[in-house]
Structures are given as structure tokens and as C-alpha cells.
Amino acid sequence: MTMRIIIVDDEPLAREGIRTFLSEEPDMQVVAECADGAEAVRAIERHKPDLVFLDVQMPALNGFDVLEAVSLDRPPLIIFTTAHDEHAVRAFEVNALDYLLKPFSQARFQAAVRRARQQWAARSGGEDPRLAALLAGLRRPPRILVKSAGRVLFLRADEVDYIEAAGNYAVIHAGAERHIVRETMTAMEARLAAAAFMRISRSAIVNLNRIAELQPLAAPGEFCAVLKTGARLSMTCGMAELRHRMGAA
């Protein structure tokens, strides 16, 4: 089966780049190209595509306006394309499949296409896309927006080992990587509370599934958490609370 694609971008070179990348995907057919939001709304409602590559910033109607204006029982999959990363959070909130930050490489484009193909296959199998989106949202662990070296990453909570405070920032430790975000520890704690995370001190929130052991310190009744990575985190929380949370994690 062939996926039907619409490309929406006010820049001709941007449309040409996407079209060129898609020419190497034999199961994908471009059914329309649009240079502005109003044209995109008409094309989407007429062609009822499976996937839309949608620019965010366009004259008159932007990409989000297009989504609000389109009225379809079965909305298409959306991959946003933009030169600006400040729209990433909103794109995630409207359940966009992916977010390509211009200029993107062919490898990054192909990764987005693979995700689209998988989602489309699920739809074609008879699964209600709205129900599937709801269930996926319930199953999906919280994600953390990270801006790093020109990229916008959505880091899954289950990839994180622990988070430590650093002034007005939080440092996220995920394996060998560290990411710095401008967010308070209180906000991080609230976001991750339901995802097996616990604040074990004023300056540390830990993924309970990453704790390998608890070791006593020199002072009576004081412990540190030793993670599977070898990191050692001092604790000020009560042992009873930690044992209870780890039992439920």
C-alpha cells in the first residue's frame, strides 16, 4: 500500500528538499504541495492524506492554525518542519508524530518516515487512531524537553538515572549523557512523581528502578543510594518512605 503525502511549506526550496527525500521512499506518493496555510487546509480536506509535512511559520495561517481549521473524522499524521525550536512543546502537545528542525539531514528525515510508516500500518490494520493515541498516551512515560547543540530532544523518563539541582537549573543524567534544563526541582518532581521517581534529598531526584543498593554512612541512620551506574547520592528522605516507594516502583 502507498502512503499519500502532502507537503506544506511557504519556501519552494524546502518543499523541493522534502520531495527529493520522499522520492527514495517507494511506498510514499506526494498528492499535493501547498505554499500557505489556507491552501493546505483545502488540500488536506480534499485529498485526505495519510501524512502531512507541515511547516510551522507561514503567512496568514501557521501550521497550528491549519490543524485547528481542518475538519476530518480521520486526521492525517503530522510531521512538523521548522527552522525554530521554540514551537517544539506545542507540537508535542497537539500529538504531532515528529518535529524536524531545519536544516535536517536525510538520516533524520528517514527516522521520522519510519515512525510514520509504523503508525500508518497500525491505522491500516483497523485500529481506531483516536483510541490508539489515547492508549499510547496512557502507556507512554513522561518526556522531558531538552534543547542541546541545536537539537530538540524529547527524553523519555525511563531513560533518566537521576536529576540533580544546579542553581536555577536541573542537570539530567541519562547514562553517559548529561542535559541541562532551566526548570526547578519542584517542577521536575511533580512531573515525574508518577513515573517511579522520588526526591531523596533537596538536590537529587532519582529513578527508583536505577537504585542498586543503599549503603550506610558514618553518621547513624544516614544512607546513600548507589545507582546501577555507580553514582552515589546522599539521602535525607526517610527509609520507610523509600522502601514503600521502591516496593511500588
Image (cartoon, rainbow, N blue to C red):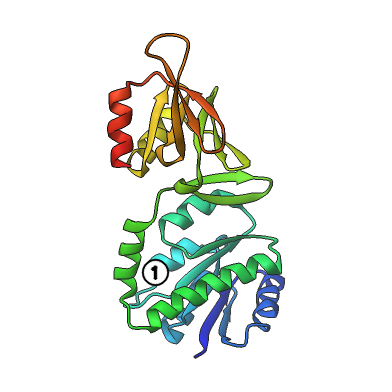
Residue 4: give x, y in percent of width and height.
51, 85
Q: Residue furthest bottom?
A: 1
The residue indicated by pointer 1 is 69
Question: 24 or 207: which is nearer to us?
Answer: 207
Q: Is residue 106 left or right of residue 211?
A: right
Q: Is residue 2 left or right of residue 76?
A: right
Give above or below for 235 relative to 159. above
Q: Is residue 132 visible?
A: yes
Residue 79: give x, y in percent of width and height.
53, 67
Residue at (57% x, 73% y) in the render: 113
Q: Residues within 10 Å of mark 1 (few under 14, many from 20)?
A: some
Q: Amino acid at mark 1?
A: Ala
Question: 132 or 194: which is nearer to us?
Answer: 194
Residue 17: give x, y in percent of width and height.
70, 73
Give above or below for 132 relative to 181. below
Quarter that holds the C terminus? top left
Residue 73: give x, y in percent of width and height.
31, 77
Residue at (45% x, 68% y) in the render: 66
Q: Is residue 219 left or right of residue 177?
A: left
Residue at (46% x, 63% y) in the render: 96
Q: Secondary structure at mark 1?
A: helix
Give above or below for 111 relative to 161. below
**Where, by quadrant of the figure, is residue 223 drawn?**
top left
How many callouts does the rendering have?
Answer: 1
Q: Is residue 10 visible?
A: no
